[in-house]
Image: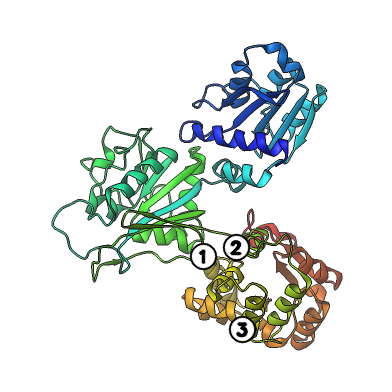
Amino acid sequence: MQIHEFYIKRCLQIAKNGLGTTRPNPMVGAVIVCDNKIIGEGFTSFYGSNHAEINAINSVIDKALLTKSTLYVTLEPCSHFGKTPPCSDLIAKHKIPKVVIGCIDHNPEVAGKGIAKLQASGCDVTVGVLEAECKTHHKRFFTFHNKKRPYIILKWAETKDGFIAPNTKNEQKPVWITNTYSRQLVHKWRTEEHAILVGTNTVSEDNPSLTVRDWAGENPIRVVLDRESKLNSDFNVFNDDGKTYRITNREIDFNKPIAIQIADILYKRNINSVIIEGGSQTLQTFINEGLWDEARVFIGITEFKDGTNAPKLNGILISESKFKSDLLRVYAKNLDKQGAQQNALDLFSLETFEDDMLATNIQYEIGKISTSEFIKFYKSRFPNLSETNIIDAWNYIIKDFPEYRLNFIKDLAQKKEFKLILLSNTNTMHINFIKENVSFYQDFKNCFDTFYLSQEIHLRKPNATIFEFVLNENDLISNECLFIDDTKDNTATAEQLGFHVWNINETKEDVINLFEIKKDLF
């Protein structure tokens, strides 16, 4: 292991000590090394107190050693005055000659300015050591600043037969599906997140407190959806054990996509993470709008036979663990093609896709080989993998399609102002998966005048031939067409052929804002 990576790993270890207390600041870890020995360590204190770098510097007994030391830190040192002075100034003041940084701070008040300030003072700065690990560690912070919303965790418990609540119960309290160990873990999670959110029905039926009782830590801010303001103050969620926000029809329009409005409200209230604990309708709303980052699902041994169905989601299973009789599955939502490819590479234990794999993938996408032939190829290359492993890896790249986007496309189709054509690189396995998991697939397909799938027309993007085919088939002129795609190679080819293009960044942009972002075309 390289020496820089060794010490950044230590930074990540100690940074976790700040989980649940630093928010909305990031939980940063810092280590100071002199002559290959750690002489100082620090992590970010509770909000308003010292940052990790300051704590690390203060922990060094002999300050003279700092002039020949290296400071390691998970995140770029700040350069602005906030609750505390800039960390970059203190580093420069102590003449620390080298700084190694895990990842750049995306906060616009920093965003490279800290690095520039350090370099201006003569400091040798290295950036990007264990960058992926550091970005994952700072996921709440980056989501807040990059996506302008909190990091969203979905959590529920379901019975062995797939229900989260029975049809009837005798008391106004939860019917426990999981054991005491799982419940204790949930309380630990509550201490780690900034807020916890539930819907009206959960409050009225279960009367939860949504506080921390089985773990030491701070209670999260409680957020209650109460459309008609019908919940009275006698419910436990409104007691004095914690702060509570009530969201009603005065704050959001319940006739429009709800989850995105809630996320915006929480962002404006400076909440950087939220765990959504119920009920089924509230959870499914966030799933349907594609607005979640992580899902934690407990499966107990209890059976209800009938009741309220558990939410349904598409996600990547990233871990599975047992807590006595309970099974915990953790899913990640992956909208990033690069991330999907990396998941597959990790599964195959490869650094990059090999030529025969790429060729097979292309042959499958243009319908030249069948699904069974495709799986047979990968089974022969990776005999230790099951068919399920291969199918899951191939389906990682499939994105959630929120229903509000369907409504946008439906509206476009109904107005009939534009000819709508879908052009997709896909394959039988993906289409079958979508048909099984997206209830409105047929409605979506019906919005388009023409629906081209690569395996059916035996052509694929970014080859120019597929664009020429579409133009000829529909008697179109390229400079009268707008092509939207999230892959740069695809939009580059279209642009060369004379199309207007939008290379959409789906982590920051949404197709429903088409007429705002591309207003010059209309």
Left or right position of 168 against 351? left
Q: Can you say which quadrant of the picture contains the N terminus?
A: top right
Quadrant of the rendered image containing residue 236: top left
| Residue at the spot of label 1 | 404
Residue 206: x and y, percent?
A: 23, 51
- Any mark on residue 512, and which? 2
> Who's the residue at 35% across and 42% down the image?
187
- Amino acid type, residue under disc 1 in the picture: Tyr
Label whose residue precedes the other's in the sequence (2 or 1): 1
The answer, for residue 104, to whether it is visible in the render is no
The answer, for residue 210, to whether it is visible in the render is yes
Front position in the image: 377 or 232: 377
Check contact, mark 3 vs mark 2: CB within 8 A.
Answer: no
Residue 454: x and y, percent?
A: 69, 81
| SS label for mark 2 | helix
| Residue at the spot of label 3 | 371
- Amino acid type, residue under disc 2 in the picture: Ile
Q: With respect to residue 185, does 50 lie above or below?
A: above
> Who's the residue at 44% across and 39% down the image?
192
**Of the two numbered discs 3 and 2 in the rendering, the one whose residue sits closer to the viewer:** 3
Label whose residue precedes the other's in the sequence (1 or 3): 3
